[in-house]
């Protein structure tokens, strides 16, 4: 049968309609019978749209549920979090609440009648298209909010359905509406809220119902690359580990620790390179490497820029940076106001390491609204560097945090401070003009703004050899530098590094006090007449103290450390280990097995010993506290004092294992623990045959080395961060990886940053210490780190545990 519009109608019996409605409104849904009846009555409002329902028409209007009933439905759906299975009930409850005052002859209710018929035909097919019903419900519910960007969708749908009773015409109008929104979003003439995509979901549902489209399962053909496992190149570890050990991997797991998610992501992934948007100069744009596809090209180029290769066009010689600085400084001192302002923008980029456009945006705002060029308590304008570390919100821990703050301040020359007193705007074309002038005057063919922006980082990283300081001083975000999450560092060391960098930059300007301009050339003679030579030199030293001696900044006073909020004061950390040690040894001489009261202090001491050793391994290796770490016995090579660990989530083509030196203290602790395990097993296993310590499997590396006794379920299980938290209880409530932060802070500024990154797994891709093509020597890495790890033992006053099982 066809309707007046020529659309073929589908005939369904009352039983069939009722059966399909029960799929739309399941019997276990809130007020199921009333809602099912309401759906049936609403469908009858448009009897000749898609269904032949003429014979079922009743003269009575549908009976709506009460407001309380609709609110109860909404509440139950939210409580049970069942918005998909109960999508129709949820949609009707909200729609009826919003449109309860309108007559059923109104366009809103007529639209809902047709909309429900679309849903009913989709549900009748009983295939994977059923998921579209939930999406249809979501679109209406979201559009009922008048403040929502989707509100226009519902209004347009009602207009489309009111204009015609022809389902095919409605479909064509919806498709035209989708295309118009897509064009608006593509041309940026409309706000991009993916409205076209949402309309597309409705259009697809209409196509399925009206054209009776079958569901087509998408198949993904596995490529040869996916189907065949990649061979892991493990030649780098051949001297210290066997093949079985190197195959140990942690699967791509869902983090179940209490470590902040951004920190976990940054820690697992290799540090993101900063200059992936690098645009090569025209002279080198057609090199063979840059003929590759763009993404790979930029990535490889970024990695190459980490190295000081002669062909690296991204950096300039130190002499060129010094001449550039002198040129800009002369303009700031001698130029007129407009020249000084534009030169200040470039000079600030040199002094702060920020991008030029960021500097220009910063100085165009009021002083109170600036983000990093702020005014100190003393009235001085400074560079404020903030490190976005994971905040510590644990009240009991906060008083014992090692860091005094997560930001520090750097000084600015008084000449620049004077220019920054008021906001001003420097246009891009003016900056470009000055860059062209500098390029010509300095005879640098490939000179660009990127050379200025990367100058400070280059000098600190490659001349002063402080890559971590470079990231902190130039304001690198933590997602580009994983070590920033973990480092608690002395502010004085950062200021010393910054002072050294400024001395290198300004070497051709201020070789002596006589070379420092007072304000302008003509004023120098006047000042010399007023002041004697010694006083004049002292005044010049004060005026340009940034370049002679780092001045004291008010916001840095009373701050010793800056950075991570997870590292604790060294003394507090030492006390923590002393208590763990005492907790193990307190059982000596008091070991009992009280079967009557169900207490066995032998097992309690075993758990206390494992708890102590877990924390010792953490503070001596800096490994991530994940399940099954520290791993199996054969990962520890006591002959070469090296430890193989794989504590990252492994991804395709990624070899996540690395080698860590074993300190003398840790080696003794592990060997003592092995002796203890054998003694404990000899006493425990005969008494508890159903809950034995599988000592042979531990020694043969079939199960993890560190075990704890669990009472639910009963038996020995591998140690994990969750079990550590339960064993500690309220003794210490802290982030699982806090000792990783602690060790990082204790090694920073004492060990080469390359070695620390190798220890923590924070190396850049293809620049790993044990990479097959690495030129780094392994022996200095082992000996240097092992010695400093033993120094950590001395600083924290760690002591070996002495356990007496007999007597």
Image: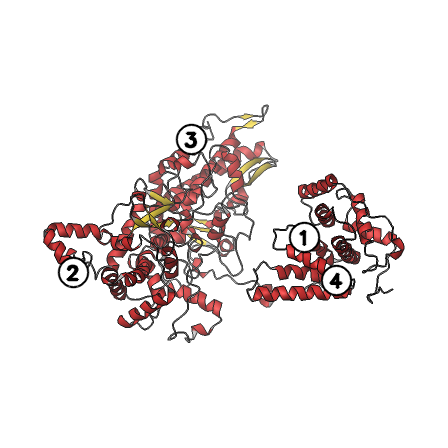
Residue on which disc 2 sits: 522
Residue on which disc 4 sits: 163
The numbered mark, 1 or 3, whose residue comes first in the sequence reads: 1
Query: As drawn, is 145 to the left or to the right of 531?
Result: right
Residue at the image position 49 percent from the left and 50 percent from the top: 262
Q: CA distance from mark 4 to mark 1?
A: 24 Å
The numbered mark, 3 or 2, whose residue comes first in the sequence reads: 2
Marks 4/1 in contact by CB < 8 Å: the verdict is no
The numbered mark, 2 or 1, whose residue comes first in the sequence reads: 1
Residue on which disc 1 sits: 138
The numbered mark, 4 or 1, whose residue comes first in the sequence reads: 1
Residue lying at the far top in this picture: please name it.
Answer: 596
Q: Single out the mark in the foreground, 1 or 3.
A: 1
Residue at the image position 38 percent from the left and 74 percent from the top: 284
Q: Secondary structure at mark 4?
A: helix
Q: Single out the mark in the foreground, 2 or 1.
A: 2
Query: As drawn, is 64 to the left or to the right of 674?
Result: right
Pick the residue in front: 669 or 257.
257
List x then y, in percent, for residue 29. Answer: 75, 44
Query: As drawn, is 767 to the left or to the right of 631?
Result: left
Query: As drawn, is 699 to the left or to the right of 275?
Result: right
């Amino acid at each position: 049968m066809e309707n007046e519009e020529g659309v073929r109608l589908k005939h369904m019996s009352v039983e069939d309609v009722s059966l399909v409605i029960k799929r739309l409104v399941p019997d276990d849904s809130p007020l199921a019978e009333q809602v099912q009846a309401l759906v049936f009555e609403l469908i009858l409002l448009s009897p000749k749209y898609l269904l032949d329902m003429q014979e079922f028409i009743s003269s009575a209007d549908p009976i709506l549920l009460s407001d309380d009933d609709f609110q109860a439905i909404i509440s139950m759906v939210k409580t049970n979090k069942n918005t998909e299975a109960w999508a129709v009930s949820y949609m009707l409850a909200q729609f009826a609440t919003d449109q309860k005052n309108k007559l059923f002859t109104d366009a809103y209710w007529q639209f809902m009648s047709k909309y429900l018929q679309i849903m009913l035909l989709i549900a009748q097919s009983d295939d994977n298209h059923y998921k579209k019903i939930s999406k249809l419900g979501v679109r209406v519910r979201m559009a009922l909010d008048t403040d929502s960007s989707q509100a226009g969708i519902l209004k347009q749908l009602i207009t489309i359905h009111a204009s015609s009773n022809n389902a095919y015409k409605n479909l064509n109008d919806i498709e035209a509406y989708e295309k118009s929104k897509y064009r608006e979003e593509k041309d940026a003439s409309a706000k991009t809220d993916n409205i076209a995509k949402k309309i597309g979901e409705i259009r697809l549902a209409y196509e399925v119902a009206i054209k009776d489209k079958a569901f087509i399962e998408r198949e993904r053909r596995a490529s040869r690359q996916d189907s065949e496992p990649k061979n892991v190149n493990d030649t780098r570890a051949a001297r210290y580990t066997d093949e079985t050990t190197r195959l140990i991997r942690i699967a791509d797991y869902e983090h179940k620790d209490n470590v902040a998610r951004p920190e976990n992501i940054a820690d697992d992934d290799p540090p993101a390179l900063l200059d992936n948007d690098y645009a090569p100069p025209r002279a080198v744009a057609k090199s063979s490497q840059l003929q590759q596809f763009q993404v790979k090209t930029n990535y490889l180029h970024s990695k190459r820029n980490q190295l000081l290769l002669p062909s690296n066009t991204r950096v300039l010689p130190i002499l060129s940076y010094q001449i550039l600085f002198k040129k800009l400084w002369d303009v700031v001192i001698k130029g007129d106001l407009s020249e000084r302002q534009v030169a200040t923008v470039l000079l600030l980029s040199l002094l702060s390491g920020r991008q030029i456009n960021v500097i220009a945006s910063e100085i165009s705002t009021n002083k109170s609204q600036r983000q990093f060029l702020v005014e100190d308590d003393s009235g001085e304008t400074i560079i404020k560097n903030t490190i976005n570390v994971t905040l510590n919100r644990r009240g009991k821990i906060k008083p014992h945090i090692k860091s005094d703050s997560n930001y520090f301040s750097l000084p600015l020359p008084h000449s620049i401070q004077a220019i920054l007193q008021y906001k001003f705007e420097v246009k891009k074309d003016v900056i470009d003009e000055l860059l062209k002038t500098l390029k010509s005057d300095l005879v640098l063919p490939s000179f660009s703004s990127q050379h200025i922006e990367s100058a400070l980082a280059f000098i600190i990283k490659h001349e002063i050899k402080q890559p971590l300081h470079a990231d902190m001083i130039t304001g690198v975000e933590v997602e580009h530098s994983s070590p920033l999450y973990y480092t608690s560092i002395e502010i004085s060391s950062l200021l010393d590094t910054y002072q050294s960098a400024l001395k290198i930059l300004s070497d051709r300007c201020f070789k002596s006090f006589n070379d420092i301009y007072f304000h302008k050339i003509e004023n120098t003679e006047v000042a010399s007449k007023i002041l004697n030579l010694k006083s004049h030199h002292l005044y010049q030293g004060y005026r340009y103290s940034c370049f002679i001696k780092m001045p004291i900044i008010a916001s840095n006073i009373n701050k010793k450390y800056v950075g991570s909020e997870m590292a604790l004061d060294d003394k507090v950390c030492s006390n923590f280990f002393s208590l763990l040690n005492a907790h193990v040894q307190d059982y000596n001489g008091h070991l009992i097995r009280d079967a009557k009261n169900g207490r066995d202090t032998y097992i309690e001491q075993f758990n206390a010993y494992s708890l102590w050793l877990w924390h010792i391994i953490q503070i001596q290796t800096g490994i991530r506290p994940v399940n099954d770490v520290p791993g199996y016995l054969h990962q520890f090579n006591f002959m070469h004092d090296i430890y193989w660990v794989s504590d990252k989530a492994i991804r395709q083509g990624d070899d996540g294992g690395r080698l860590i030196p074993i300190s003398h203290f840790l080696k003794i602790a592990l060997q003592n623990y092995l002796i203890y395990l054998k003694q404990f097993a000899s006493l425990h296993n005969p008494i508890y045959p159903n809950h034995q310590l599988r000592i042979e499997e531990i020694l043969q590396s079939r199960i993890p080395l560190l075990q704890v006794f669990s009472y639910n379920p009963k038996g020995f299980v591998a140690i994990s961060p969750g079990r550590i938290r339960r064993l500690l209880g309220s003794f210490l409530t802290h982030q699982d990886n806090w000792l990783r932060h602690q060790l990082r802070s204790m090694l920073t500024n004492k060990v080469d940053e390359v070695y620390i990154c190798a220890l923590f797994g924070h190396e850049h891709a293809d620049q790993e210490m044990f990479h097959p093509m690495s030129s780094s020597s392994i022996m200095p890495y082992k000996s240097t780190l092992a010695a400093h790890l033993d120094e950590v033992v001395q600083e924290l006053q760690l002591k070996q545990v002495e356990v007496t099982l007999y007597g």
